Image: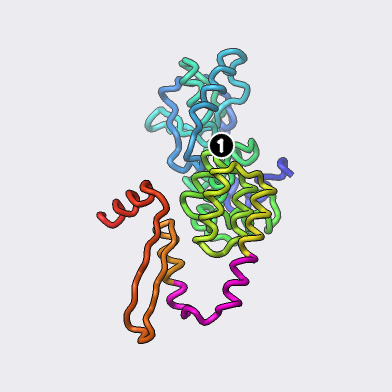
């Protein structure tokens, strides 16, 4: 399946036969000064683990760079913009290399560089699930394509693409936990079983604090979802849909339990914001000071 990645690039990129004087440049392998190589603003990967960079730097010192960087050449500036390989570039710099091998790929547009970069990272499995989802979303917006078309381009099933995109429904804190390796993609998918933002956040904290496995997280998520459904069925008229929606919205914003208690008149009531330790209280205080 991995070899099929990028099989639909022609649907988005018009491929032209290079001119005779350009053929030797396209796909050329060059030894380039690291000072001339610049990260791409289109890079899907946003977070780099310092420990893993250090490990890769140590490997490069011993064995050299196994895979060249991929970049496009900017003749006007006599510099190179990375398409794929920023993690490797950082490790090379840390390892003290002054020059690195770069595979030059001429690109026609920013969109093409973004697309090729995403495909290259996916092929090497360099992206975590959230970075992959953000890359998919950006491609869909930039190219105005459907999930079906995107699935064909990256060589995956529509359901696989859809499930990855669903991870962006998680709160920012949960997404960061995946990006920084605090929990896996499997944990994140399990949390999506819980539609209620407050309950999902509660289970999320339990997962981190108790270092639950994916299976344990799935079991807890199912139990939580089932218990929430029973409470709603037992007392369905306790709150109007509008009030319940506002509660859910504020819970998502504040990351804690928020209750809206309406009086019988329906015109006045109370908003109760819960906190469970002094650190949460400080965060809430800072939020309302803004």
Residue ID at (37%, 46%): 279
277 to 162, vertically: above or below: above
Depth order, front residue of 77/272: 272
71 to 190, vertically: above or below: above
Dot 1: few (<14), some (14–19), or many (≥20) neighbours within 10 Å?
A: few
Dominant secondary structure (helix, strand or loop) of the stretch shown in magenta: helix
Q: Position of residue 96 (x, y in %)?
A: 47, 15
Q: Is residue 213 left or right of residue 45?
A: right
The colour scheme applied to this rendered structure is rainbow
Depth order, front residue of 64/38: 64
Q: Quadrant of residue 227?
A: bottom right
Q: Quadrant of residue 193?
A: bottom right
Pick the quarter of the image with the C terminus: bottom left
Q: Look at the image and tell me whether residue 201 can be seen.
A: yes
Q: Single out the residue that lies furthest toward the top.
A: 62
Pick the quarter of the image with the N terminus: top right
Number of numbered discs overlaid on the protein picture: 1
Q: Look at the image and tell me whether residue 152 can be seen.
A: no
Q: Position of residue 204 (x, y in %)?
A: 54, 51
Residue ID at (62%, 72%): 230
Magenta highlight on residue 274: no
Q: Which residues are magenta?
A: 226-245
Q: Secondary structure at mark 1?
A: loop
Q: Single out the residue that lies furthest toward the right.
A: 1
Magenta highlight on residue 227: yes
Q: Single out the residue that lies furthest toward the left.
A: 289
Depth order, front residue of 58/82: 58
Residue ID at (54%, 43%): 209
Q: Position of residue 153 (x, y in %)?
A: 64, 51
31 to 202, vertically: above or below: above
Query: Can you identify the residue that label 1 sits on?
Result: 19
Q: Position of residue 272 (x, y in %)?
A: 37, 66
């Amino acid at each position: 399946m991995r070899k099929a990645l990028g099989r639909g690039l022609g649907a988005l990129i018009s491929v032209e036969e290079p001119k005779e004087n350009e053929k030797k440049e396209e796909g050329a392998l060059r030894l380039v000064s690291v000072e001339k190589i610049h990260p791409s603003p289109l890079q899907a990967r946003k977070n780099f683990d310092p420990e893993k960079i250090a490990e890769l730097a140590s490997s490069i010192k011993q064995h050299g760079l196994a895979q060249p960087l991929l970049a496009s050449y900017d003749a006007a500036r006599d510099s190179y913009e990375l398409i794929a390989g920023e993690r490797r570039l950082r490790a090379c710099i840390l390892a003290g290399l002054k020059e690195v091998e770069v595979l030059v790929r001429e690109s026609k547009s920013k969109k093409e560089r973004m697309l090729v970069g995403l495909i290259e990272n996916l092929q090497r499995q360099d992206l975590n699930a959230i970075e992959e989802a953000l890359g998919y979303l950006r491609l869909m917006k930039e190219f105005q394509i459907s999930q079906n078309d995107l699935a064909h381009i990256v060589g995956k099933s529509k359901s696989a693409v859809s499930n990855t995109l669903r991870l962006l429904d998680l709160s920012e804190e949960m997404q960061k936990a995946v990006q920084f390796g605090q929990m896996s993609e499997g944990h994140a998918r399990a949390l999506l079983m819980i539609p209620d933002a407050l309950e999902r956040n509660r289970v999320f904290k339990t997962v981190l604090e108790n270092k639950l496995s994916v299976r344990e997280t799935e079991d807890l998520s199912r139990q939580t979802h089932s218990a929430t459904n029973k409470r709603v069925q037992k007392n369905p008229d306790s709150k109007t849909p509008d009030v319940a929606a506002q509660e859910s919205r504020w819970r998502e914003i504040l990351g804690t339990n928020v209750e809206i208690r309406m009086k019988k008149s329906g015109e006045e009531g109370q908003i109760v914001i819960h906190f469970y330790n002094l650190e949460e209280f400080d965060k809430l205080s800072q939020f309302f000071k803004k």
